[in-house]
Image (cartoon, rainbow, N blue to C red):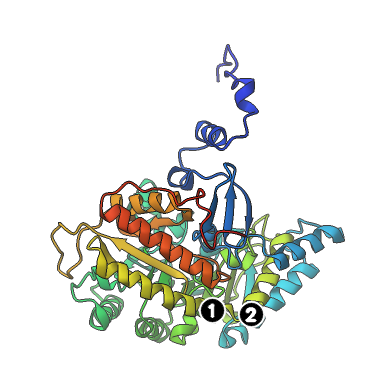
Amino acid sequence: MPTPTTAPEAPPAAAAGDGSAGAILRRQAARESAARTYPRALPVVPVRARGMTVEAADGRRYLDCLSGAGTLALGHNHPAVIAAIRAVLDSGAPLHALDLATPAKDAFTDALFEVLPPALAADCKVQFCGPAGTDAVEAALKLARTATGRRGVLAFTGAYHGHTAGALGASGDVAVREPVEDAAAAAVRLPFPYDYRCPFGIGGERGAELGARLAESLLDDPKGGVLPPAAMLLEPVQGEGGAVPAPDGWLRRMREITAARGIPLVVDEVQTGVGRTGAYWAVEHAGITPDVMVLSKAIGGSLPLAVVVYRAGLDVWRPGAHAGTFRGNQLAMAAGAATLRIVREERLPSRAAELGERMLGRLRELERRFPCVGDVRGRGLMLGIEFVDPEGEAGPSGALPAAPETAAAVQRACLERGLILETGGRHGAVARLLPPLTMTDTQCEAVLDRLADAVQAVARGVRAVPVPGGGRGEGAAP
């Protein structure tokens, strides 16, 4: 490799020392990978945060309905979480311990077993793997393949399971999968129940039942081209897919189909877990017990942590068969144990269910008022608003064409009003709300007011105007 004749030009000294929000964002754009995502739509430089409130470097305050993509069940810097982290730091305990037994890990495992679905907790193993949800998905798929001796995976349209090879192969987003398409070779794609854009054009219970029948037919037809799979992998509520909840009856059918055929059912609770959907685990709505649960995000109390919980009968690993250098994050285990217990003791899943119903009611008013709102849906505090082109031609199920530009405009208008949310779903046309479970009634009303104002401004083609005080409206104070 030839040696460069000149060193790269250094940024001007004044620019390097400029700590303004604009300068920080410009340096990020110049130095970070083109893969960065959130700063493109959310040019915010957070410097302080507490609960649901984020204060940016420019002094503006925001209500955060992104919550670390659902990671912050208790919001930012909850006092109990900070105290748990500080206790580990002050104790002199090792911060890196691989998979050695430690008091922090023991306490976390106790807290986890206290809240797992009872039928799973009674006969399960817990595996600590790499620190991200995608690592846990990889571990779960590898475990299922090792235990069954089979290769294939049943996955679903609209799914999102991460960006490592196996998880990516089971995801439904063609755009992110295309560069490594061979990763999807072992995945058989089944239709996920999606009322608004039902692949059968009918939606409802009938649409979900047809999807279940298709799954059975493919598995049982000797000429169907589907080899016996190692696992079925699903999300009880699709997050990145657009906040699409699976009907409880359909989930029970998937459990019946897999159990009857000896197929491990792997449920991805990375985003839905720890109270987000109005139950501690989203599978509890349907009353099913999966063979494997994949957990991350909120279980680390805002820090990186991921685990796989599975039936003890699947525990066929040889020592070291699946590992990860950072599977022993002591601070995350302490923060996670505190989070798990607070969510349980303060009955925050019930609170999420109550707030979610209230928000859905207000959001459905927007659906009635504005033709650009095609569908409102979700469960608990995992909500989505799908924006459409009201002038477009409706499809077989009555759904209008997706309008990603409208969703992006609403996101920008919300940001100007002091509200952070993200977009996702098909074509990026869904505005997604993932507020912390600790959101107050006042904050809830402020979120709904700002969102309604943003939708109205965009629907009427009016330029979004910031609320007085630069986003410091009611409910924004820490």
Callout 2 touching callout 1 (CB < 8 Å): yes
Q: Quadrant of residue 303?
A: bottom right
Q: Can the viewer see residue 310?
A: yes
Which element carries disc 1, helix, strand or loop?
Answer: helix
Q: Which residue is mark 2?
A: 346
Quadrant placement of the C terminus = bottom right
- The answer to whether any part of residue 328 appears in the image is no
Relative to 116, residue 478 above or below:
above
Question: Residue 173 vs residue 476: left or right?
Answer: left
Where disc 2 sits, the SS reads loop
Residue 53 location (% of width, % of height): 58, 58
Tell me what residue is drawn at x 76 percent, y 56 percent.
96
Q: Position of residue 334 (x, y in %)?
A: 73, 66
Residue at the spot x=45%, y=69% of the render? 382
**Location of mark 1 (residue):** 351
Left or right of 96? Residue 128 is: left
**Mark before the other along the chain sequence, 2 or 1:** 2
The image quadrant where one finds the N terminus is top right
Above/below status of 155 relative to 90: below
